[in-house]
Amino acid sequence: MKLLETQASRYDLGMRMLSIGRIQRLYAEVAAHVPEQGDILDVGCGTGGVTAALLTEGLTEGRQVTGVDRSPQMLAVAETKLAEPVAAGRLRLRQVPITGLEREFPAESFDAVVCCLVLSELSATEESYALDVFCRLLRPGGTLVLADEVTPDSPVRRWLYRVGRWPMAALTYVVTQTGTHATRELDRKLTDRGLETVRVAHRQGQSFQIVTGRKPAWRLQPQP
Ligand SMILES: C[S@@+](CC[C@H](N)C(=O)[O-])C[C@H]1O[C@@H](n2cnc3c(N)ncnc32)[C@H](O)[C@@H]1O
C-alpha cells in the first residue's frame, strides 16, 4: 500500500487493480460494521475510500464523520472527491497523525473509530499505541472497527499468503524503502484492552479481517 501512496492521485486506481475491482465492496463492508448514528472517526482515511462509504451507507442524517491522515497528498485527493459532504458540514478532513489525535480530540469524543489498512503500516509499538488511543477516543458503548491484512492462522494459508505477497512487498521496499507487514491477533488485542463482543469477519482467504469490538457502556468503580 505504501507503494501506491507515493502517487496519491493514483492510489484509488492502484487499489482497484490490486483488489481486482473489489475494493469498493470492501469499503462498503467495513462501513456497514459502523453504527448508523453518531460521531465517527476514520483514522488514516487516505483518499477517502472508507470515508465515502461511511457517508453513503446507513442513515447519514445522524452521522458526523471526521477523516484524519498524516499525508497532505492523500488528504488533497479526499478533499476533491468529498467536496460535497465537506461543504454540507457532514464531513471534516484534518491532517493529523495518530500521535496527534489526543491533542486534537478530547477523550471519549467518538461513537465509532474506524481504521482500514493502516495498522499494517505501523510497527508493533506504534500499533499498540494506536489501539490504546482509539479506545480512549471512544465513548462508553462506542464501536471500534479495524480492517486490515492479517497473517492467516492455518500454516497452508500462511504459506500461500507469503508466496503471493512477496513480489509486492519487495517492490514496495525498492520504491519507498519501507515495508508493510500483515498484523495479527487483532481480536485478542481488542479483548486485552477491555473491549467486548469482539467479532471477526474473514475475507480474501483469511488474509484480511474486519474486527469489531465495543467499549463497555459502564464499568464498576472500585469501592473506597
Ligand atoms: C493504505 S492507506 C489506507 C487508506 C484508507 N484507509 C483506505 O482504506 O483506502 C494508509 C493510510 O494511512 C495513513 N497513515 C499511515 N500511518 C499514519 C499515521 N501514523 N497517522 C496518520 N495516518 C497514517 C497513510 O498516510 C495512508 O493514507
Image (tube, rainbow, N blue to C red):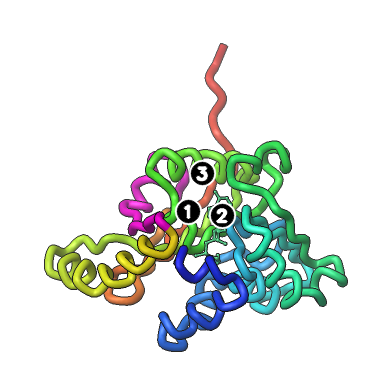
Q: Which mark is residue 8?
A: none
Mark 1 element type: strand
Residue at the limit of the structure toward the top, as seen here: 224
- Give x and y (percent) for residue 142: 60, 51
Residues marked 2 and 3 touching at CB (< 8 Å): no
Q: Residue at x 37, y 52 (%)?
A: 186
Give the quadrant of ligand 1.
bottom right
Mark 1, residues whose alpha carbon is within 10 Å: few (<14), some, or many (≥20)? Answer: many
Tell me if 196 is positioned left or right of 203 in this view.
right
Of residue 176 and residue 136, the one placed in the foreground of this image is 176
User: Which of the numbered marks, if any, corresponds to residue 143?
Assistant: 2
**Quarter of the figure with the C terminus:** top right
Q: Is residue 55 magenta?
A: no
Looking at the rendered structure, the secondary structure element under dot 3 is helix
Mark in the foreground, 2 or 3: 3
Decide if ligand 1 comes within 8 Å of the CB at mark 3. yes
Q: Secondary structure at mark 2?
A: strand
Q: Nearer the viewer, residue 12 or 148?
A: 12
- The vertical placement of 217 against 186, above or below, is above
Relative side of 98 to 64, left or right: left
Residue at label 3?
130
